[in-house]
Every structure is written in structure tokens, then in C-alpha cells.
Amino acid sequence: MNKNVGTVCVHGKKQRRNVDNTGAVSFPIYQSATFVHPAFGESTGFDYSRLQNPTREELERVVNDLEEGVDALAFSTGMAAVTVLLDILEPGDHIVATDDLYGGTIRLMESICKKNGIKTTFVETDKVENVEKAIEKNTKMIYIETPTNPMMKIADIEEISKIAKKNNCILVVDNTFLTPYFQKPLKLGADVVLHSATKY
């Protein structure tokens, strides 16, 4: 059955597993920090909220359904997600990034990444040829935001994904402004999509 986006936002695409026996129609908010185990060495899948929590797991499931991805991770802030994502890079790696990224992301790349030996080249990604020219031998990631914040520049995700694949780069798309309601970067060739859920 094909569900419209409103239904997916509320319920996801698939029948969710019941996490309790209340029969609640709307998924409950679990405020518990710790969870009881059925027996020694057995887990329900929930041990401590820092690791996983049923409410967060439901959010991840629904966002993944909306993005049509393989999996999703929810973080306390968008910048926490960006930080974890950039942590997959090694000293000596190179990033090609949109010149008009969210300011916090630029600051993270210019300070923490730089300090850790990761170089970033910022280009106007609304012109695909700029991305191609900025690729170096050690480029491991192309990081774009489209539309950008605040100038609303548009990048061609599909064309940039071809450049990424040709150069063995991970293509990351910040989808904050359009959300999966209007744009599906994974369907256009992106490897990772992220957004700040406090925006739209």
C-alpha cells in the first residue's frame, strides 16, 4: 500500500513492533533512563537511554522511511550529527564543501577538522564544474547543502553524485531546508543525508 507523506510522518511505512502491551495508537514518549532485563544476559534491546530509547528509535524509523534510506540516527543537535559524520575522516583527508554551508558547519570544518589534519576546500557548489576542479587525490568527502543557508543556492545533487562516485568520495547532503517532503537526496545519488529537525 502506498502511504502519503502525512501518514508516513505519523506511522512510518511499515507496521511498527509493539514496545509494550498498552495498545497505544500514538507512539508514547519513554522518559525512562534505564530498562529492566528479562533475565541475566538477556536484553529487550533497550538497556540505557544513552544507547537507545524506544522513542528515539521510533523517530529514527520514521525519518528513515521519509528519506527512503537504509537506516537513520537521531542526535540531540544537528551539529552533533555533523561532528559524528566528519569523525569518519582521517588526518590527511580532504573535503570539498559548499561555500555557503550553515555557519556552525563551516566553523567546525575550519577549526576542529583543520586542527585534526583534515583540509576543506569551500566552493560554490551551484556550479558543478567547481566541485570537479576542487577534487584532490586525498578527497574523501563532498559535503553540500542545497538549498544553502542563508543564500538559498541550489546544487545539482545528481551531477555531483557522479563526481563523487567517479572519485570514490562520500556525498553528504544537508537537506535541512527542503526536508524529505520536497527533496530526496538519497534517490538522487547521495550517500548520507542529514538535517536539523528543529527547522522545518
Image (cartoon, rainbow, N blue to C red):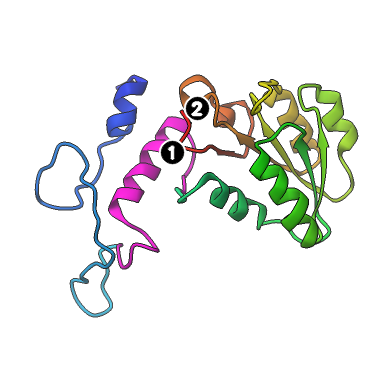
Image position of 70 (left or right of 101):
left
- What residue type is disc 2 on? Thr
Taking 66 as reference, is 70 above or below it? Answer: below
Considering only order in the chain, which callout, 2 or 1, is on the residue closer to the N terminus? 1
User: Which region is colored magenta?
Assistant: 46-73
Q: Residue drawn 46% across and 37% down?
A: 197
Tell me where residue 12 sits by quadrant.
Answer: top left
Residue 51: x and y in percent read 39, 63
Instruction: Indicate yes or no whether the magenta region holds residue 115.
Output: no
- What residue type is disc 1 on? Asn
Label 2 packing within 10 angstroms: few (<14), some (14-19), many (20+): many
For the residue pair 31 and 14, the one nearer the viewer reads as 31
Residue 175: x and y in percent read 57, 31
Q: Residue drawn 49% across and 37% down?
A: 69
Q: In which quarter of the image is the N terminus?
A: top left
Residue 162: x and y in percent read 75, 30
Taking 103 as reference, is 114 above or below it? Answer: below
Image position of 101 (left or right of 73):
right
The residue tagged 2 is 179
The residue tagged 1 is 64
Disc 1 is placed on an element classified as helix
For the residue pair 78 and 94, the one nearer the viewer reads as 78
